[in-house]
Amino acid sequence: MPDDDIPSSRRTALSRRALLATTAGAVTLSAGHAAATTPTDQMADDPSDSDRPAAVAQAYIEALDADDRGSANELIAADGILSAWSEQEFDWVGGFEITYVGFETVAQRDGDVTADITLTIAGNTGTVRYRFRDTTDGWLIWEALDGLRSAPAQETDTETTASAAAEAYVTALNAGNRGAVNELIADDGALSAWSSQEFEWVGAFEFEFGGFQTVRTNGNEIVGDVELTIAGNEQTLRYRFREVAPGRVELSAPVAGLRTTGEPSAEAAADAYLTALETADRDRTNKLIADTGQLAPWSGQEFEWVRAFEFELVGFEATEQQNDSVVADLTVRIADTTAAVSYEFRRIDAVGWKLWDAPDGIR
């Protein structure tokens, strides 16, 4: 029978998703953790065929524990079914202590061994199942039948990678891992890294990723809705994601994020303003206009025509930007037409970003 049909009633299988769920709050970063890997050319002399895959398995788990992606990838056959770890796939590994426990062969034929590897991740013990083959480079991992990545990595488009980044971000929040959270935030974006003080409240809540929905795309940037549950309450947050390198997407700006004192960015204010127009909420619309700015609040009479139309923010592009002010071109859908408008936004102390002026606004 196929190797992946071997009975596993005695096994406690581990998967990345299950591990991240069961180890929430128990994660420790292995800062300064010394590599304990055993290179394949330093394994015991003349080991038996059954011993060589076990040595490869142990070296692989120790490379994961040491957060050593290069060494882990050297133990994966280049022409095998299991692809090498990408940088983004490997992000979660460094947040866990991973200990090799044991190795049990479950199927064997010439040059091919299928085995269960017992390991402990953040105190949770279980097994993963891999196939090993004797290649021209020696014994290497060939396939993950029930591994930490059960399927080979696929070429993904930017939207799929953004979804993976969103899931990793929520998972890191759930684990209380500020370092991993901040690694997913672009260095030069509008979303700042979490400070230790800002992050204090995060550890008191359970976060669960629910899904990702693309709102709009613009070149290498994506605005997406992140569905999640916080302490049992379902929420949808909106972030801008940017591809910073091939296959690497990071969060670059909050549109409706977790840390909000008022609107956290100019784009967030624009999105909230169009949403308020869409829902014909004049009070909310006017609260998004700065009291001391050049843009006057909507009067009741002016607002009457708004109720007859649907509004949606389609695009946002900053044309002038300083620390506390942004001028941006907005592409707006009004009913069945698309219009180009321009607004100036300013960040007001303690209340966040608001609309300041309308060089070419809806009114």
Image: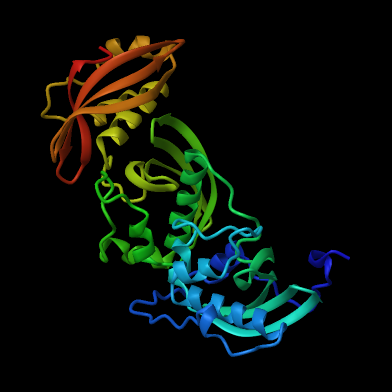
Residue 88 location, x and y as percent? 45, 56
On the rendered structure, is 320 left or right of 158? left
Between 230 and 322, the one lying in front of the other is 322
On the rendered structure, is 129 left or right of 239? right
Determine if residue 258 is in view.
yes
**Which residue occupies the extreme bottom position in the image?**
45
Position of residue 37 relative to residue 180, above or below, is below
Residue 288 location, x and y as percent? 25, 31
On the rendered structure, is 50 left or right of 42? right
Determine if residue 123 is in view.
no
Residue 294 location, x and y as percent? 12, 22
Disc tally is 0
Q: Residue at x 50, y 79 (%)?
A: 39
**Which residue occupies the extreme front position in the image?**
136
Q: Quadrant of residue 282?
A: top left
Q: Residue at x 28, y 60 (%)?
A: 198
Q: Residue at x 50, y 50 (%)?
A: 164
